[in-house]
């Protein structure tokens, strides 16, 4: 599977810690390798460390000061940069997104995003042209990018595993 990172930026992240945690959890569960976040609390790293410990995998959290540097580095390394915004091209119309083959940095915003991001991204991409949320946009985008394959991902060294059941909860400790 291609390498996928998520970059979370925006002007009001300090007020958005819970959403940033949800974004990190969605990114991890839906196949991304890491999240870069501008702002956010050390709590986020601790939460994800605990999730990795129990449920496996090595999803990484990185706090960054300069989001432009992350975008530039990603582009210089040959990766694709896609900014999710309701104003962009429908994701179903962008061939490179449909192919889902390249390493990709997926950028999601908060209330507002810096204008420069629109020009720095290779594509501004919409997950429908209706306003919703960075959490839902990211989940749908990743699922389409990986064509559903991420749902079968094996999280290495998990201590807990769910045995799927139609009723009730069945969790096995490994
Ligand atoms: N006006 C914003 C926009 O550009 O999409 C909506 C702000 S929304 C509160 C916060 C974030 O959710 C946005 O920065 C974007 O990443 C994501 N988002 C919301 N609706 C979206 C959509 N339809 N398609 C893609 N991303 C969306």
Image: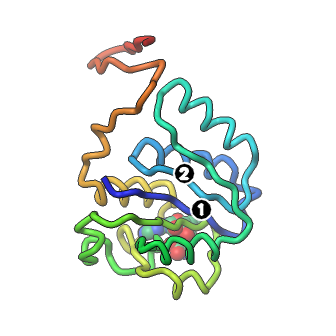
Q: Which residue is mark 2?
A: 23
Name the side, left or right, on which 66 lies relative to 126: right
Looking at the figure, which quarter contains the C terminus?
A: top left
Choose between 22 and 133: the one closer to the eye: 22
- Asked if residue 135 is positioned above or below residue 114 in the image, the reply reads above
Q: Residue at x 41, y 53 (%)?
A: 139
Element assignment for label 2? helix
Mark 2 Cα shell of 10 Å, populated few (<14), some (14-19), many (≥20): many
Q: Residue at x 48, y 80 (%)?
A: 121
Res. 131 visible in picture:
no
Element assignment for label 1? strand
Q: Residue at x 27, y 37 (%)?
A: 152
Name the side, left or right, on which 11 lies relative to 107: right
Q: Residue at x 37, y 20 (%)?
A: 162
Q: Gap in Å between the C-alphas at discs 1 and 2?
A: 8 Å
- Asked if residue 136 is positioned above or below residue 67 in the image, the reply reads above
Question: Is label 1 in contact with label 2 (beta carbons under 8 Å)?
Answer: yes
Name the side, left or right, on which 50 lies relative to 147: right
Residue 31 in percent (x, y) is at 39, 47
- Asked if residue 40 is positioned above or below residue 166 in the image, the reply reads below
Q: Which residue is mark 1?
A: 8
Residue 95 in percent (x, y) is at 24, 76
Disc on the earlier residue, 1 or 2: 1
Which residue appears farthest toward the front when viewing the image? 77
Residue 72 in percent (x, y) is at 56, 77
Mark 1 Cα shell of 10 Å, populated few (<14), some (14-19), many (≥20): many
């Amino acid at each position: 599977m291609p390498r996928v990172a998520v970059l979370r930026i925006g002007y009001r992240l300090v007020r958005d810690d819970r959403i940033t945690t949800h974004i990190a959890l969605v990114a991890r569960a839906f196949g991304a390798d890491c999240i870069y976040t501008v702002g956010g609390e050390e709590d986020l790293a601790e939460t994800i460390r605990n999730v990795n410990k129990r449920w496996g995998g090595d999803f990484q959290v990185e706090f960054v000061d300069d989001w432009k540097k992350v975008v530039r580095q990603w582009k210089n390394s040959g990766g694709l940069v896609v900014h999710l915004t309701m104003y962009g091209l429908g994701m179903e119309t962008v061939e490179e997104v449909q192919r889902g083959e390249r390493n990709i940095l997926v950028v999601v915003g908060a209330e507002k995003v810096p204008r420069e991001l629109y020009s720095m991204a290779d594509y501004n991409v919409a997950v429908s042209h209706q306003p919703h949320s960075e959490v839902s946009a990211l989940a749908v985008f990743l699922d389409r990018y990986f064509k559903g394959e991420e749902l079968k991902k094996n999280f290495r060294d998990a201590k807990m595993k769910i045995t799927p059941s139609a009723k009730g909860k069945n969790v096995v400790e490994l």
